Image (cartoon, rainbow, N blue to C red):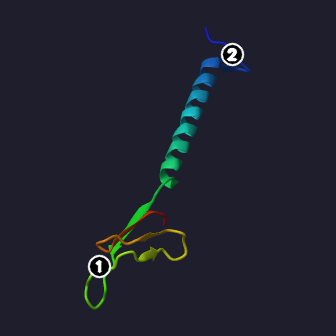
Amino acid sequence: MHKFIMGVSFMKVRTFSFITTLFLFVIIVSSTNLYGGVTGKISGRVTDIETGEPLIGVNVILKGTTLGSATNNDGRYAILNVTG
């Protein structure tokens, strides 16, 4: 036998509460996946324009940010965690 609260079956109230909670949980989880943690990587190689030799220890900085990297012995660099 169902209990009635203000003319509404307790089972209906309980089912509505569960569905509402589930819906809110799905919305919250989806929104964090859409907006959270999207990062990229910029990489390349710095060489001398005349000789083509790699330039070692060059600081490459992403303008307008605090992100940057120094080139290695092959002139290569990688800047991680770049956001759009």
Q: What residue type is labelled 1?
A: Pro
Image quadrant where one finds the N terminus: top right
For the point 51% across and 53% down, the residue is 36
Q: In the picture shown, does residue 25 fall above or below 18? A: below
Q: What element carries label 1?
A: loop
Q: Nearer the viewer, residue 38 or 31?
A: 38
Q: In the picture shown, does residue 36 fall above or below 60? A: above
Q: Where is residue 77 in the image (x, y as percent from the top left)?
A: 36, 70
Q: In the picture shown, does residue 30 fall above or below 47? A: above
Asked if the residues shown at circle 2 and circle 1 are in contact, with their CB atoms under 8 angstroms apart, the answer is: no
Closer to the observer: label 2 or label 1? 1
Q: Disc 2 designates what residue?
A: 4
For the point 43% across and 69% down, the residue is 69
Q: Where is residue 64 in the image (x, y as percent from the top left)?
A: 55, 75
Residue projecting furthest to the bottom: 50
For the point 54% across and 71% down, the residue is 65
From mark 2 to mark 1, how far is it between C-alphas?
Answer: 80 Å
Q: Position of residue 17 (x, y in %)?
A: 61, 28
For the point 71% across and 19% down, the residue is 5
Choose the circle earlier in sequence order: 2 or 1.
2
Q: What element carries label 2?
A: strand
Q: Position of residue 74 (x, y in %)?
A: 28, 72
Q: Which of 3 and 38 is in front in this view?
A: 38
Quadrant in the rendering for residue 6: top right
Query: Would you call the spot at circle 2 few (<14 residues within 10 Å), some (14-19), or many (20 or more)?
Result: few
Residue projecting furthest to the right: 6
- Left or right of residue 9: residue 70: left
Q: Disc 1 designates what residue?
A: 54
Q: Which amino acid does label 2 sit on?
A: Phe
- Left or right of residue 13: residue 39: left
